Amino acid sequence: MNQLAIYPGTFDPLTLGHVDLIKRAARLFERVIIAVSAAPRKKTMFTAEERLAMARRLCARIPHAEAEIFDGLLVDYVRKKGARVIIRGLRAFSDFEYEFQMALTNRHMDPDIETLFMMTKESYSFLSSSTVREVAALGGDTGKFVPDFVQRELRKKITKDKG
């Protein structure tokens, strides 16, 4: 059995919900690659390189986790890495419809790749990167939502954008 899983996302920014899923996935698989999307469909606060740097900093704290940027179709990236599992997080039922559609699309493109859905901890079920960005932009405390180093990066980014 292949012991590599890919956890793709925008991670703009990484939240404690992401951290929870990455730690749990790293206990299930020999290796987990956090695949940071280079060209997300939405405008991001952080560049791909900034998001990758934060993901790598997090991975330094989590055994079996590493981070890379990917571009293009996820199934092509998963095949290239020799993985057979995609990890996707679900916070609430509202996430399921989109994630289900994407999982079936990926399965249609490559039936050998499985999508593993993991539920976030209940305490993070309300948390999204867009919510964190909004709280940060309005001067709120994001300390309960993101790792300490991500909070510092958010503050720098907000201060730079206002200055």
Image (tube, rainbow, N blue to C red):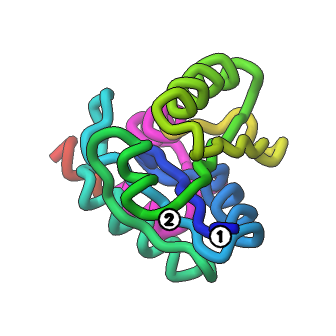
Residue identifier under label 2? 33
Report if residue 113 lies within the magenta region: no
Helix, strand or loop for disc 1: loop
- Residue 156 percent location from the top left of the image: 30, 58
Residue identifier under label 1? 3
Q: Relative to the observer, which residue lies in front, 58 or 73?
A: 73
Q: Residues within 10 Å of mark 2 (few under 14, many from 20)?
A: many
What is the span of residues highlighted in magenta in the rendered image? Answer: 130-155
Q: Amino acid at mark 2?
A: Ile
Residue in the image at 70% along x and 33% along y:
126
Residue in the image at 28% along x and 60% along y:
50
Furthest residue toward right: 122
Quarter of the picture containing the N terminus is bottom right
Say how many tags the image has.
2
Residue in the image at 81% along x and 45% along y:
123
Q: Amino acid at mark 1?
A: Gln
